[in-house]
Amino acid sequence: MAERLKIKLSIADRVYPLTIDPAQEEGLRKAAKNIEQLARKFEQNYAVRDKQDVLAMCALQFASKVEQRGIDQQEDTREVNARLRALDELVNSKLSIK
């Protein structure tokens, strides 16, 4: 079993100490960096009262992207299934002729 790694991530002017699996480090650091960048963008472009508002908007932005990907995948899956059914019907109709 791999050793646990202790890291510190800075998000919205706060430091969060974490103990993680080494395989998680890159993803967590990238996520923290993305949150910081998006928070700065919100602070620069919108009137925000405090960091809580900024973090709530960041959470909403990231969560909506995840949800939209799920919706898009469902739509893609439905389209693929419809095409496979049509192809299956075509193959079956050609096989039935013989």
Image (cartoon, helix red, strand yellow):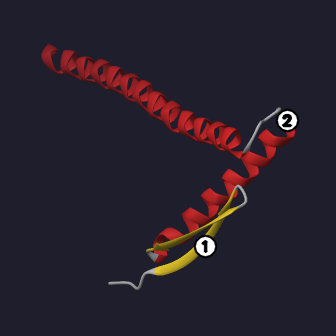
- Residue at 46%, 28% in the rendered image: 71
The reply, left or right, for residue 96 in relation to residue 82 is left
Residue tagged 1: 8
- Residue at 62%, 39% in the rendered image: 56
* The image quarter in which residue 92 lies: top left
* The image quarter in which residue 75 lies: top left
Where does the image place residue 91, in percent across and percent down from the top left?
A: 24, 23
The N terminus, quarter of image = bottom left
Specify the label residue 45 is tagged with: 2
Amino acid type shown at disc 1: Lys
Q: Nearer the viewer, residue 77 or 26?
A: 26
Total numbered badges shown on the rendered structure: 2
Q: Are marks 1 and 2 in contact (CB under 8 Å)?
A: no
Relative to 29, residue 95 above or below:
above
Where does the image place residue 98, in percent across and percent down from the top left?
A: 13, 18
- Residue at 85%, 35% in the rendered image: 45
